[in-house]
Image (cartoon, rainbow, N blue to C red):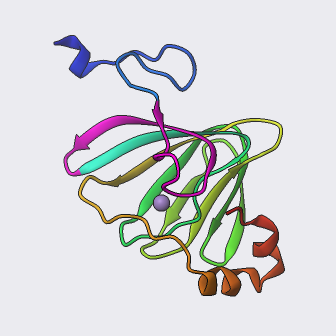
Amino acid sequence: MSDSVLRKATSFGRWTGVELLQYKREGEAPFSGVTRQVLFEDAGGAQWRYFEVAPGGHTTLERHAHTHAVMVLNGSGHCLVGDRVYSLEEHDLVSVPPLTWHQFRASDSGALGFLCLVRHERDRPQLPSEEELARLRADPLLAAFIRT
Ligand code: MN
């Protein structure tokens, strides 16, 4: 079973035997133009994924107890982590701490692809309440960034 050892890269951000998935189920949470690929389902208790956000698209604004270790593989964009917005370029690393609001956005001119490491066993993401959204949006920079 050579496939379980080596899954060759085909085009950029695609691999043989790695299924291109929806980011989340339709209607489960707000997002725009995001695909998900599970590169390693359970590698010693970790799951390694690759997400691609289409130009102008965004992931869900969410938080959870589990952490994210992210590396931007291609493209550029921004992310909100906690109460700050960070600019993202290729190969930048992002650490999302537990129970910290986060959202990734691609630039308008190109897709943003990033690798994301999580625990295989992990809690479900939480969405912000109206009160939480209002609190975040009290900061004009965050208000301008957040997509829901
Ligand atoms: Mn998350």
Q: Quadrant of the N terminus?
A: top left
Q: Would residue 77 be counted in the magenta stretch?
A: no
Observer-nearest residue: 94 or 82?
Answer: 82
> What's the residue at 75%, 74% (across, down)?
142
87 on left or right of 16: right
> What's the residue at 74%, 80% (across, down)?
137
Observer-nearest residue: 86 or 50?
Answer: 50
Q: How many marks?
A: 0
Q: Magenta region: which residues?
A: 21-45
Q: Based on the displayed image, in which of its 4 quarters is residue 146 positioned?
A: bottom right
* Image spot of residue 8 (x, y percent): 39, 15
121 on left or right of 147: left
Observer-nearest residue: 5 or 51?
Answer: 51
Q: Is residue 26 above or below residue 13?
A: below
Observer-nearest residue: 5 or 128?
Answer: 128
> What's the residue at 21%, 12% (across, down)?
2
* Image spot of residue 72 (x, y percent): 59, 44
